[in-house]
Amino acid sequence: LLTWSDNIRQLEVLGKTGLLDSGGAEELAEIYRNYRNRVHLLSLAGEPRLAPREDFAEQSATVQELWQHFLPAAESA
């Protein structure tokens, strides 16, 4: 993970090493790409770089579910 500074390659490493199942890693990468693309479009349009929460409600739920599966100890902390 320390080799790469970008989120996409870090997620790929998590999937390849089995720390996160490969399907979950790819799903997280796709969610990140979609959010990043939205933020870039907002920036280019001169808008605030905050996407409305409701536009990403389903993706947010997926991220939270994977996060809880990946780090169950963080939930109890």
Image (cartoon, rainbow, N blue to C red):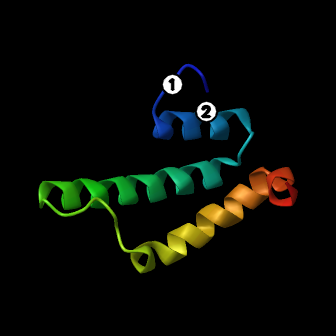
Q: Looking at the image, which residue is at 64% across and 47% down? A: 22
Asked if residue 21 is positioned above or below residue 41 in the image, the reply reads above
Q: Quadrant of the C terminus?
A: bottom right
Residue pointed to by mark 2: 13
Residue pointed to by mark 1: 4
The residue lying toward the viewer, choosing from 64 and 15, is: 64
Q: Where is residue 35 shown, x and y percent of the image?
A: 38, 59
Q: Quadrant of residue 53?
A: bottom left
Q: Where is residue 45 shown, x and y percent of the image?
A: 12, 61
Of the image marks 1 and 2, the number of the one nearer the N terminus: 1
Q: Quadrant of the N terminus?
A: top right
Q: Quadrant of residue 63?
A: bottom right
Q: Where is residue 21 shown, x and y percent of the image?
A: 70, 48
Q: Looking at the image, which residue is at 62% across and 54% down? A: 23
The residue lying toward the viewer, choosing from 41 and 16, is: 41
The amino acid beneath tag 2 is Val
Horizontal side, residue 30 vs residue 60: left or right: left
Given this view, does label 1 or label 2 mark the residue nearer the observer?
A: 1
Report helix, strand or loop for mark 2: helix
The residue lying toward the viewer, choosing from 60 and 12, is: 60
Q: Looking at the image, which residue is at 65% across and 41% down? A: 15
The amino acid beneath tag 1 is Trp
Q: Where is residue 29 shown, x and y percent of the image?
A: 49, 50
